[in-house]
Amino acid sequence: MKHLLRSSVVVAALASCAAMLAGGCATTPERPQTMRDPQADFSTYRTFGWYRPPGDDGAAKPHSIVDGYVRTAIGNELTGKGYVEVAAGATPDLSVAYETASDEKLKSNPFRVGVGVGSFGRNVGGSVGVGSPGVRNVREGSLVVHAIDHARDIEIWRGSIARELGRGGVDAVTVQAAVSELMRDFPARGGDGPGNDGRQ
């Protein structure tokens, strides 16, 4: 019984040590960064559309596959918050613009921690193995979204997010998840408080 109790104590101690080491080295994605014009009354906005630069005649232009993913994701978030997308050529309350980019950057791998426990007769032995960190190249994608008061031509909300892209590149599910996280605090219609997105 004492042998089993001692073994349990060693396992718990080693596991705790490993968790602390791993926790100290693990990296979590950076939180999205957002800004909001404190003077903007979001309860007055009902519709949204896509921003057109000055001089743009509004003629249909082809969009990339990624543009399609981004537009669909932003549209899903805004309609989920109570806004209505206007028909092409109509004037919206909010004009939405966005920018995307990808970049190669260096990233440090976290320490690799292994825990081993062995019984040697009446003695219980244990070990914690820590691997050396490494550096690797990763591809990171970034997205910036702007909401503009169309009548005043003033930016009233901006958000940016950057996430590591997997080997499969960009897909609709990944884009939607990133946009949902980014626009979580975009004010919903019927409420002007941050984080009020109308979801239960």
Image: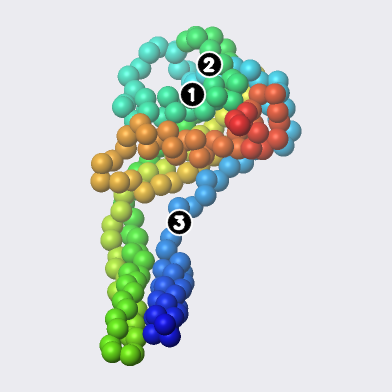
Looking at the rendered structure, the secondary structure element under dot 1 is helix
Q: Residues within 10 Å of mark 1 (few under 14, many from 20)?
A: many
Query: How far is the residue under mark 1 from the one under mark 2?
Result: 8 Å
Is residue 154 something one can see in this rendering? no
Nearer-the-camera pick, 199 or 154 = 199
Residue at mark 3? 28
Looking at the rendered structure, the secondary structure element under dot 2 is strand
Residue farthest to the left? 167
Nearer-the-camera pick, 31 or 131 = 131
Q: Earlier in the sequence, mark 1 or mark 2?
A: 1
Give the left or right position of residue 139, taking residue 41 as reference. Answer: left
Q: Residues within 10 Å of mark 2 (few under 14, many from 20)?
A: some
Residue under the image location 44 percent in, 46 percent down? 162
Query: How far is the residue under mark 3 from the one under mark 1?
Result: 27 Å
Residue at mark 2? 85
Check the picture and name the quadrant holding the N terminus. bottom left
Residue under the image location 67 percent in, 38 percent down? 194
Q: Amino acid at mark 2?
A: Glu
Residue under the image location 31 percent in, 76 percent down? 116
Q: How many marks?
A: 3
Residue 171 pos. (x, y %)? 32, 34
Nearer-the-camera pick, 154 or 34 = 34
